[in-house]
Image (cartoon, rainbow, N blue to C red):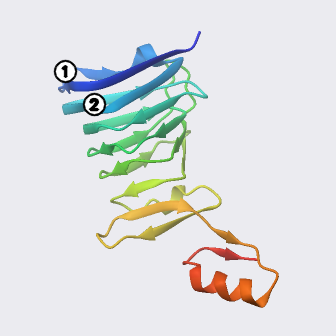
Amino acid sequence: TSTSIVLNAGTIVVDQSTAARFDSLIYGNATLGAGMKIEGDGLAVLLGDAGNTFENNGTIDCDVQIAYAEVTGNGTYNGDVTIKVDDYFEFDGNVVISGGTWNGTLTVEEGASLSITGGIFKNDPSEWLAEGYKMSKLADGTYGVEALKVYEVSTKAELDAAIAEARDGDVIE
């Protein structure tokens, strides 16, 4: 049975003796709304089975371990993030990040994988870019990830327009 939970407002505080574990979401989806915050000096552990999504539109102000299928949303992660295999729940650690602002260090443990298709990163995420995506250094020194744009041209006018519009990493065919 698949479950889902939506947390729209409030604060979860984690300290070194506790972990904010989303174990009850193992077979479902989770959403943190814009008014939601996880903070403290403990660890937020995000677990989700294949096909599940963790959507963060809030703020996570602590370190995070992720063994979730897909991480989406426009939320902010201010701690360090570790992508890992979760042997206890048998999650394979194959994670896709498609959004959010990531201000800490990303680490991918042995056996896990990370594929980035979107988001803004304080540290260079280029080693984890998904095929068909590019990274750009933004004016504030962070890195943005977005899909490559492919321009298919068949005339000189189309070629000129594509050259004028294309950015680094885009493809003109």
Q: Which mark is residue 45?
A: none
Q: Residue at x 30, y 51 (%)?
A: 104
Dividing the picture into quadrants, the one containing residue 124 is bottom left
- The amino acid on which the numbered mark 2 sits, given as a three-letter code, is Leu
Dot 1 or dot 2: first in sequence order is: 1
Q: Residues within 10 Å of mark 2 (few under 14, many from 20)?
A: many
User: Is the residue 169 above or below the residue 64 in the image?
Assistant: below
User: Is the residue 65 above or below the residue 30 in the image?
Assistant: below
Q: Residue at x 62, y 73 (%)?
A: 170
Q: Quadrant of the N terminus?
A: top right
Q: Are marks 1 and 2 in contact (CB under 8 Å)?
A: no
Residue 39, percent from left and from top: 20, 33
Q: Quadrant of the C terminus?
A: bottom right
User: Is the residue 153 above or below the residue 40 in the image?
Assistant: below
Q: Is residue 67 visible?
A: no
Residue 115, percent from left and from top: 56, 49
Give the side of residue 37 with respect to residue 75, left or right: left
Residue under pointer 1 = 17
Which of these two is toward me, 8 or 71? 8
Dividing the picture into quadrants, the one containing residue 42 is top left
Distance from the alpha carbon under mark 1 to that under mark 2? 9 Å
Mark 1 or mark 2, whichever is nearer to me: 2
Q: Is residue 153 visible?
A: yes
Q: Which mark is residue 43?
A: 2
Name the secondary structure under disc 2. strand
Give the side of residue 55 with respect to residue 27, left or right: left
- The amino acid on which the numbered mark 1 sits, given as a three-letter code, is Ser
Residue 71, percent from left and from top: 47, 38
Q: Residues within 10 Å of mark 1 (few under 14, many from 20)?
A: few
Total numbered circles: 2
Give the side of residue 167 with respect to residue 119, left or right: right
